[in-house]
Image (cartoon, helix red, strand yellow):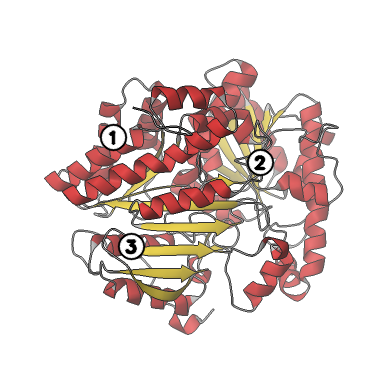
Amino acid sequence: MYYEYRPKKPIQAPRGTTLTCKNWDTEAAMRMLMNNLDPEVALIPEELIVYGGSGRAARNWLAYTQIVDILKNLDENHTLCVQSGKPVYIAPTHPDAPRVIIANSNIVPHWATQEQFDKYDEMGLIMYGQMTAGSWIYIASQGIIQGTYESFAAAGKKNFGVDSLKGKFILTAGMGAMSGAQPLAGTMNEAVILDVEVYAERIKRKVKEGYCDKITADVHEAIQWVEEATKKGTPLSIGLVGNAGEVHPWLVKRGIIPDIVTDQTSAHALLDYVPIGDIKALDELRTKNPEEYSRRSLDTIAKHEEAILEMQKQGAVAFDYGNNLRGQAELAGVAVRNPDGNFKYPGFVPAYVRPLFCEGRGPFRWAALSGDPTDIAKLDKLVLELFPEDQTLVRWIKLAGEKIPHLGLPCRVCWLGYGERSTFALRMNDYVKKGIVKAPIVIGRDHLDCGSVASPHRETENMLDGSDAIADWPLLNFALNAVNGASWVSFHHGGGVGIGYSLHAGMVIVADGTDKRAKRLQRVTTVDPGIGIARHVDAGYEKAKEVAETKSVMTNKFRS
């Protein structure tokens, strides 16, 4: 890891309008890379791990230092190429080209196994970039919270016929950098949520940040709190120190069945999942005998998954949140599928989110390079001004402004659709130009979007035409964003669900307030969700066809 190159002080991105690089694109890339590793933001910053168990921002500390040095000197006629977290080529390009092109964790399909990836990682040849860790656009737990919030809300409407989860009990596990959004997403829906996490310090961190209300290591106390709060209809989030492989079967045995059960543990890689046992001893086992550690992980995952399936049988609404728990449980011998081949309980995308993808809607996000939260507040008001008819969006922005803390650079996420992204991006650029906000705004999104990912156990699970594993779409998305002038683009393998299970693309573009940038913003924020609508039109979704017709999205023919 070249620890001798690690900065002596904790990393924090510069704030304000003073350039330390040669242009705002490279300045933004450098600041967002640093922001990914801010102790307020990253899961284990000293190891370059941002979130998702082992998702890193750079391959090692030497590579990080080299990337920062290059970005400080990179002009508008060159593009930095980053191969799995390591700078490898400064290419002569042109001013409208991306300033950085990133590829993470990509392996030829025949060799795209966790075992082969681990071998390459040990050799220092590759790193796991997750989704937004290695593409430098992670915004702490806020990045996932609206998707989780909307999924919980959709479960209420679809499965219970209610607009609020007041008096409902949600059970889940995982409280890391991303999964730590679950407690607040639950209480924002007025639910009582019990989140099981093995590491007490992670729960304490989320309590301190305001994402979780209470912590206990006593399951009896936790259940007492759950019962009291559900009876009163009081929103409450509880972090229980424990292992889901033990807690969930314990609950089943005692007939304690939640209304909703889901999961966001780091199950995508067996070495990131934590099996039942002493934490210190397991940490040693992971290093000394990874095969035995992986075997124990599978054994615990089987217990974890079997309990979820039993809860479903007894009336709980179960859905997967895309961490490949079902897939790993299947490897462990658990019968996770119905006779028709579909999973016994669905992923959150086919259950709740796919209609949004058909509209070109997805997790749009922005960060204020000024470092001033008032810039985000001004942009929150702009969202409300531009889209007052979207009551879901209005409710989200108001709740986010009240409840979500700013960690690292101030930022916001909200799900915007085709056309809305361009409208908002151009107005943000105008705000920068007029000085309404103090510095340029970084605009990006999660790789979990309508047209940027192929992931058969998550975003593309159970596609209407059976095209779950077709990965041409994220490649087209990556290329379209590059040729249309994104500030930086990325293409990754394995995010969310693990090596061998997904391919996905990311994009970021900076609103720097110039007229020239407005043209690039228009292009990028049009084609990025546009290919998502095309993907769903091609798969046969009537909703996508209606949106394409209404919004004149050209799929297989020109429109006047």
The crowd level at tag 1 (other Cα within 10 Å; few <14, some 14-19, many 20+) is some
**Count of numbered circles in the view:** 3
Q: Which sits earlier in the primary sequence, circle 2 or circle 3?
A: 3
Q: Nearer the viewer, residue 337 or 37?
A: 337
- Three-letter code for the amino acid on which mark 3 is drawn: Arg
Q: Quadrant of residue 25?
A: bottom left
Residue 355 in the image: above or below residue 2 = above
Q: Nearer the viewer, mark 2 or mark 3?
A: 2
Question: For the point 33% across and 63% down, which residue is it?
Answer: 99
Q: Quadrant of residue 20?
A: bottom left
Q: Is residue 306 left or right of residue 418?
A: right
- Three-letter code for the amino acid on which mark 2 is drawn: Asp
Please, what secondary structure does the residue beneath circle 3 have?
helix
The crowd level at tag 2 (other Cα within 10 Å; few <14, some 14-19, many 20+) is some
Question: For the point 80% across and 55% down, which residue is it?
Answer: 298
Where residue 473 sits: x, y (%)? 54, 46
Question: For the point 45% across and 25% down, which residue is it?
Answer: 547
Q: Quadrant of residue 436?
A: top left
Q: CA distance from mark 1 to mark 2?
A: 31 Å
| Residue 251 visible in the displayed image | no
Q: Is residue 183 left or right of residue 515?
A: right
Q: Nearer the viewer, residue 454 or 365?
A: 454
Where residue 396 sits: x, y (%)? 41, 30
Q: Is residue 56 left or right of residue 423?
A: right
Judged from this view, the residue extending furthest toward the bottom is: 4
Where residue 96 sits: x, y (%)? 28, 58
Residue under pointer 1: 423
Residue 311 in the image: above or below residue 108 = above
Residue under pointer 3: 31
Please, what secondary structure does the residue beneath circle 1 have?
helix
